Amino acid sequence: MATTGRFTNDDARERYEAAYDALAARWPVPSTDLPVPTSFGPTRVRRSGAGDGIPLVLLHGLNGSGLSWHGVVERLAAERVVYAPDVVGTAGRSVQTAPLTSADDYGTWGAELLDGLGLDRAHVLGYSEGAWFATLLAARAPGRVATLTLGEGITALVKPSRKVVARMVRAAAVPTAKSFARLDEWLTPGVTLTDEDRALARAATAYRRRTPWPSPVPDERLRAITAPTLAIFGAETRLGDPLAAAHRVTALVADSRVELVPGGGHGVLWQLPDQVLPLVEEFCRTHDTP
């Protein structure tokens, strides 16, 4: 069995590449693409922004890429350099060359990513599955993470609801525009995706991952996190139980706080940016002093 991820065939890869280029055209600020070597394969990173603040690393969610942040990056990059990688082992322009066999491997990958970017310390914001990647990094290299922000990090903390899993499996089994639209409307109400976003997410389903899937991070890993941690949940999220997830954060991460956003669903950052982005900006700003 293959031990690294790959597209089902060359046509699938070409469709993904075309969709990726179309979405890249929506990136609203000047950027530079950086190839960053890691022991799991070269990681493609998009660098944007400038300023004196500690840099911010953005880790995307399921079927996403670094381009997933196009709708919020302009604001996040106003005071600091922002790095948006395509997480290795997922569909994107990073190339997995070695197996990722355990969740801890993603912590190692994250630390190597910081090394390759020349970052002694960075703020880290992960969304959905990206919050799982971010949590593993913060537990693996606690001294390297200036702050940890978990956006809708349900699967890093508690099990997702069975109903969500079933709906996602059905949509992936028949990846049509209609099936994805129904899933998006149910899971992320209030979020308006572009046609390019939808096309790239559909194309990503032709990528066969060979990586661990998100599962609740063990207690001892959460206790190892020393970075100031902000967990943001939509109060109406359907992904899982936000109150149970909030309890694990505050019980196990020493320096942590939770924001439960009224009316927010799983896509709360994109659904209610004027409420959520100021929380992220102020949190990073408060901890910019080395």
Image: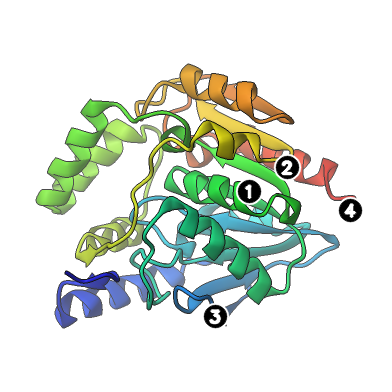
In the figure, residue 184 lies in which quadrant?
Answer: top left
Name the quarter where the N terminus is drawn: bottom left
- Residue 236 on image: x %, y %: 42, 21
**Residue type, mark 4 in image:** Pro
Q: Which mark is residue 138?
A: 1
Q: Say which element carries label 3.
A: loop
- x, y percentage for residue 277? 64, 41
Q: Which residue is tagged 4?
A: 290
Front-most of residues 60 and 214: 214
Q: Dot 2 corresponds to which residue?
A: 227
Residue at the spot of label 3: 37
Give yes or no for contact between labels 1 and 3 (Cβ–Cβ under 8 Å). no
At horizontal 43% and vertical 51% (from top left) the residue drawn is 103
How many numbered dots are placed on residues in this image? 4
Q: Do the residues labelled 1 and 2 touch (CB within 8 Å)?
A: yes
Please name the amino acid that badge 2 sits on: Ala
Residue 113 in view in this figure = yes
What's the distance in space between the residues labelled 1 and 3, CA to CA? 20 Å
SS at badge 2: loop
Any part of residue 29 in sight? no
**Which label's residue is closer to the chain start, 4 or 3?**
3
